[in-house]
Image (cartoon, rainbow, N blue to C red):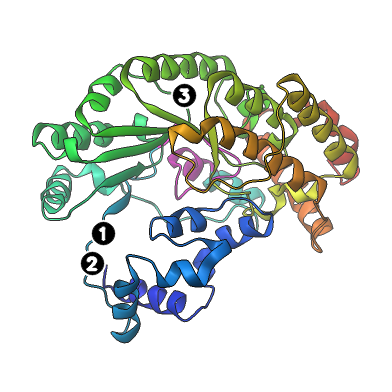
Amino acid sequence: MNVDIMRSLRLQLLNGESPDICKSCRYEDKFDKVSGRQRQLLKSGIQVDNFEKTLCSSPHWANFEYSLTNQGFTENNPVDLQIDLGNTCNSGCIMCSPTYSSKLALEFKNLNKISPDIFPVYPEIKNWSDDLTLIEKFIDELKHIPTRYIHFLGGETLYLKSFYNICNELISNGLAKNISLGTTTNCTVYTPELENIIKGFKNVHLGLSVEALNPVNDYIRWPSKINDIKNNLEKFIELRETTGLHLSLRITPTIFSIYHIDTLFEFMLENNIIAESCNILQDPSYLRIELLPKNLIKDILAKIEKIISKYNITDLKTKTINRRNDNNKKYVIQEIIFEYKRLLENMQYPADRDQDLIKLIQALKTFEQSRNNSILTYLPEYEEFLRSYGY
């Protein structure tokens, strides 16, 4: 909590600066979406729309003042933890990186020989969580930290043996009953062991990383199979009904997944599940939805309008920041749908659009040479658009 990077970050924020590490949230804010920045501010009782007053009345005001006058140091212990277990993963999502996917790490070594400027070589990652001694040390440290929430990430956490080892140890030593647990899955894995973990923790939140309930998800989150994903989603929903598991979709809209985002909206409405955007993807920049031509955006908007009409939903013109409150689900789902509608209606081409589209074609050709597939199999509607840039 008091290492140099954290102290520097606190001072930048307290001095009203915008650190580069915050660019994803600033990017979302630009599109009038609820960003992670806004959700975290809420934990301190701070509202963006009423910033000065709510900052001054924040229960954490004294902590902010202490850090400002003490070189960024804090006397606080962390209460929310995000723990990256490693990069072991069974998927190679096109918008991901070897830092988070061992499958991509292997693939990038070969792709680098074809397109080194798009597929750089990453240093090899060894999962700390494979070391039982380090797991024991981590759990021992938790005994001395008043942790309320732990979010585990990978890789694919449900594919990692260490995830189950840590959870079961926290349950057996009694720490879990006071901790809310979160993790995210690509929905390719389901195990009955989840039920025991859910029963052992105060509550459990499972993020479902799905980009579309359409075969295009197989291309984006290669080599997943949409029918397997749908079967596992049914199991997670059934588990929610019997255990109280909290579910949400964790989506990362790209130039490809946005075309079938209506399938996710319908799933959300039918199953009372909200979606939390990990971000409006900005990196790699060649997968940004702002690159889409106007005619395809028009098609997407028409499909969204059909969902709005079918379910007779209206734009509430509100912005619920606390989106994990179960009482808000119905309204949050409606807000999210209209957020994307407004986003697409107001979309402007970035200045570097042509350069990024050239990179997009290069990336697609390189990926597809390795995977023996074609984006046009999944999105024939994109043929004219992609061909015009050399696909």
**Image quadrant containing the C terminus:** top right
Q: Quadrant of residue 349?
A: bottom right
Q: CA distance from mark 1 to mark 2?
A: 6 Å
State left or right for residue 290 relative to residue 316. right
The residue to which callout 1 is attached is 78
Residue 165 image point, x, y percent: 20, 33
Residue that badge 2 annotates: 76
| x 30%, y 52%: residue | 80
Instruction: State left or right for residue 103 relative to residue 75.
Output: right
Q: Is residue 351 above or below residue 164?
A: below
Would you call the spot at circle 3 few (<14 residues within 10 Å), some (14-19), or many (20 or more)?
A: many
Pointer 3 residue: 188
Q: Nearer the viewer, mark 3 or mark 1?
A: 1
The answer to whether the residue labelled 3 contacts the one labelled 1, judged by CB atoms less than 8 Å apart, is: no
Q: Give, as a single range, the part of the protein colored magenta.
A: 89-107
* Amino acid at dot 3: Thr
Q: Nearer the viewer, residue 285 or 304?
A: 304
Q: Specify the amino acid type for callout 1.
A: Pro
Quarter of image, res 373 = top right
Q: Given this view, does label 3 or label 2 mark the residue nearer the observer?
A: 2
